[in-house]
Image: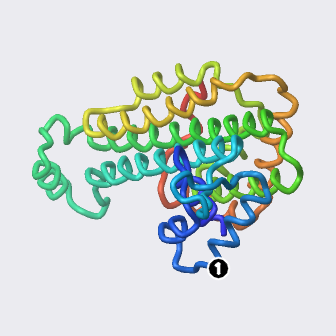
Amino acid sequence: MVNTTQKILCLLLGTEMSVNNLIAQTSSDKSHVVDVISNLGKLGLLEESKDKRHKQKKIKKLTSVGKEISILLTLISEYSDAERSLTRKIESFTLKEDISDGSKRLQLRDIGWSDDEITFNPKYVHNSHTIKFHFKRIMYELILYRYSLVMLRYKPKKKLKQFLHEIILSILTQQISEIIAYIEDIGPHFITTIKTRERIENAVRRWSNKFIQKEVKQLESQLLMLLEVSDSIKLESAEYLKDIIGTLEGKLRSSKENELRALSYFVDNFDYDPMSSERG
């Protein structure tokens, strides 16, 4: 149900649609989509109005809080797309350890690397992974900060609050490996975006390189967009934000399965400590 919910909320951003159109663009299971739409309406994320061209036809659109959540989900999705693009780029010049140095040089020459660049290949790979991880940490912070500010602005009732928690948690647990390691390292915290722009710029300056320049630029753009949206909401209650962030982080940390997945990820993918990077 969470995936269908996300699709419907994102489809309705900036537009209105009939139930039939929503069904056509989300799932072939009509009854399931109708149930999701009905639930979103009861929770206060969708509202209904009559089509101006066809008075008998009813259309669905986002409420104010529905729009806020849709913006957040859309930005997260676009960031994930950009991150996948960066991952593919890094993989294109990350060579297997079990091949000879000569074979490595030939492979890198085939994709246009100079001899000097080939010499520093391990450093390029290391820095590329580091900036990807650093950006993910910032993205995680911004997701929680932005989501918490939405909760602060609309102060949803228990059912809606729980429902929205489930949506955000489902997104965060898709990238649980790095996130669990991050929150276990620093513990519950209060997030502020005051220095985030500076942290993003410093990361690009310190770890970016010519081979991932385009992909990093896309990631940087998505982070700055989310930062800009987040900063547009006035901060009124630090304690309320701490409560929401603490609740979400507590749920993420509580799963032993998630901890095992996190450990496995770092054992399999890193031979250095990503936490040694500057925290900004």
Write down the residue under mark 1: 31
Q: Is residue 52 visible?
A: yes
Residue found at x 49% / y 27%: 200
Residue found at x 76% / y 53%: 165
Residue 129: x %, y % from top left: 43, 44
For label 1, the SS is: helix
Q: Is residue 176 visible?
A: no
On screen, residue 275 above or below 26:
above
Residue found at x 64% / y 53%: 172
On screen, residue 60 above or below 3:
above
Specify whether 29 is left or right of 38.
Answer: left
Residue found at x 41% / y 28%: 204
In front of the other: 223 or 228: 228
Residue 62: x %, y % from top left: 64, 49
In front of the other: 69 or 242: 69
> Total label count?
1
In front of the other: 73 or 172: 73
The amino acid type of the residue labelled 1 equals Ser
Quarter occupied by the N terminus: bottom right
Specify whether 162 is left or right of 138.
Answer: right
